[in-house]
Image (cartoon, rainbow, N blue to C red):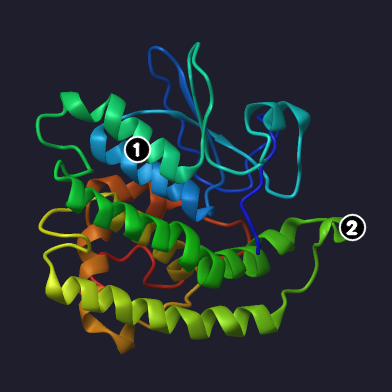
Amino acid sequence: MAVCRLPAINARPALFSPAVSRQTEPMTLLYHHPLCPHSRFVRLVGAEIGVEAELVEERPWERRQDFLMLNPAGTTPVLVEDGGEPVPGGTVIAEYLDETVGPGLNGRRLMPEAPAERVEVRRLVEWFNGKFFDEVSGYLVTEKIYRRFMPTDAGGGPPDMNAIRAARSNVRHHLKYIGYLASTRNWLAGERMTTADLAAAAHISCVDYLGDVPWTEDETAKLWYARVKSRPAFRAILADRVPGMAPAAHYADLDF
């Protein structure tokens, strides 16, 4: 299955716009791809808990040695704090930020305290970062976006319509599950918003950019996404654009 594989920073102009870049003291870098759902997950987590990072946009069809030295898996995202060891992977970075920054946030931590509640959050984060990505967002982002920019000898070319049709079918089942969770709880994992909601919203946002979420099929799931989408942390995500490929008309509309 497709993965978000990225090279290292360079001086090329970004393919995606606008480029959001803020420097903190000490400098924190987030190697990401704007339409990589795992990268979006980390950006949402950072925005919710107030972590500012300089975003280093990477291209998934190039595997540069410098980036592979940060993360031998060659996947995004990777967080690099000044003088620290690289922290790779969306789930790992999210928990790292919650554990290192969260304790000073006076109740704004994104992981609950009770062990059983943490298990449910982790289960759902894995559901979306793993199962949803493997069945829906990974296919759609790769086939409809990445392959547009990849050279033919690296897998570029027309999208695989069979993969797209499979993803469009699969997203319906996931949307129903989101609707079920949202109808039985205040948020997906329980009474308050957690990383589970941000992981789900990150993947949904990529699919929504492409216009492949059948919102008319589950009003409860749509209302849940509207709640997350309306949060300030989501603003930078909604500003992302693919050159030559506009998002769905409702993508940035908070009242869709």
| Nearest to N terminus: mark 1 or mark 2 | 1
Specify the quadrant of the image occupied by residue 238.
bottom left
Q: Residue 51, image x and y in percent?
A: 32, 29
Which residue type does callout 2 highlight? Asp
The residue lying at 69 percent from left, 26 percent from top is: 69
Residue 153 badge: 2
Vertical side of 143 occupied by 189: above or below? above
**Most foreground residue, 131 or 12:** 131
Classify mark 2: helix, strand or loop.
helix
Give the residue at mark 1: 95
**Most foreground residue, 224 or 55:** 224
Classify mark 1: helix, strand or loop.
helix
Q: Residue 229, image x and y in percent?
A: 27, 59
Can residue 11 be seen here? The reply is: no
**Most foreground residue, 114 or 83:** 114
Q: CA distance from mark 1 to mark 2?
A: 37 Å
Vertical side of 167 occupied by 93: above or below? above
Query: Viewer-nearest of labels 1 and 2?
Result: 1
